[in-house]
Image: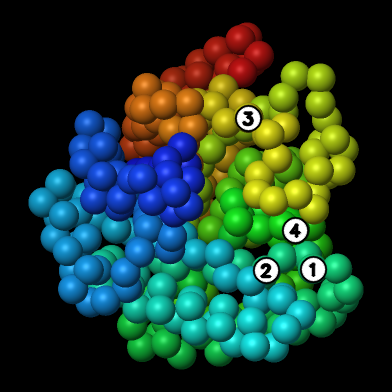
Amino acid sequence: MRISVFPKGDLEAIAVHRTMSVHDWIEKARVLPVDGLELYSGMFWQTSDDFVDQVGEHLAAAGFEMPMLCASPDFTHPEPRRRAEEIAAEAQMIRITARLGGPRASTRVLSGQRHPGVSREQGLEWAASAIETLLPLARELDVTLALENHYKDGSWKYPEFAQRTDVFLELLGRIDDRAHFGVQYDPSNAIVAGDDSAEFLDLVIDRVVTMQASDRRLAPGTSLDDLRRSDGTLGYSPLLQHGVIGRGLNDYPRIFRTLAAAGYDGWISIEDGVNGMDEMRASVEFLQEARQMYFGGSTQVRVAAHDEARRATGV
């Protein structure tokens, strides 16, 4: 298992306000003892080969790999022209992934937004067709398309079309490819969807190719029902609060045991930093400990002690 980080806390500055560049983020991340940096489509203000190569050179100079590129295609948009544009934009991200990450690097795919008036069957058909359209390019460039169990992109009005587990599993089942297509597992998003994140992992473990790790809490005095009532507003709800991994709602010991038992050896990318780099570093340290404990041949006694400590503290 290898560790990368994703600048959730700086995403708006980079992708929306453009007061921070991808190069600024690479420099900022130098203080973190990680193997790679997950990048985001909105970081590429330019998409020319020269610009992409400059990013790659900067990553290499800083000692990082680029294992994952986070994109947010909206394949369920009701307008055909927009769906075609989304497919073309995703293809561009696949090419950038190949240029920066090389073999085994992944590009995130989604179903799209839950647009009013789009039926379940129609949305599934559009999303599956878009992914199938992109798979030949992914195979040609040896890039893996990673379908995330997603909540809502920061620029979206509506939540993920395939947010519900049954819809996600049906979309996943429509794509047979297991060499260049799989699941990007996000445990926090499973909780937001109303699922137990560890139980959701059990359902998709045989197709997990990447993982985003975060931990979230609901704002004091709120519930998942309150969160769902916020759907239809732009971006993420303020009712969701980010924090250090291992201190929120996810049962990470069980998640790590499931991944280790399945022989998972891919990347786990930390989606953190909303409350500053100190919390990002604490999340890195948590994953480093987990890597040693669950993926490095540690004893059952240490695992049991860790679980007991987690139960005792209520974390």
Q: How much space separates mark 1 and mark 4, taking CA atoms?
A: 7 Å
**Residue closer to the observer: 132 or 259:** 132
Location of mark 3 (residue): 241
Which is more foreground, mark 4 or mark 3?
A: 4
Please say if 264 is above or below 287: below
Helix, strand or loop at label 1? It is loop
Which is more foreground, mark 3 or mark 1?
A: 1
Q: Would you identify the image quadrant in which residue 195 lies?
A: top right
- For badge 4, the amino acid type reads Tyr
Q: How much space separates mark 2 and mark 4, taking CA atoms?
A: 9 Å
Q: Would you identify the image quadrant in which residue 107 lies?
A: bottom left
Discs 2, 1 touching: Cβ within 8 Å: yes
Callout 2 crowding tier (Cα within 10 Å): few <14, some 14–19, many ≥20: many
Q: Is residue 212 left or right of residue 55?
A: right
Q: Earlier in the sequence, mark 2 or mark 4?
A: 2
Q: How much space separates mark 2 and mark 1, taking CA atoms?
A: 8 Å
Discs 1, 4 touching: Cβ within 8 Å: yes
Quarter of the rendering occupied by the C terminus? top right
Callout 3 crowding tier (Cα within 10 Å): few <14, some 14–19, many ≥20: some
**Residue closer to the observer: 164 or 235:** 235
Please say if 248 is above or below 258: above
Location of mark 1 (residue): 115
Discs 4, 3 touching: Cβ within 8 Å: no
**Circle on res. 112:** 2
Location of mark 4 (residue): 158
- For badge 1, the amino acid type reads His
**Can residue 179 be seen?**
no
Please say if 229 is above or below 152: above
Percent across and percent down for residue 137 are: 42, 87
Please say if 145 is above or below 254: below
Percent across and percent down for residue 265 are: 38, 53
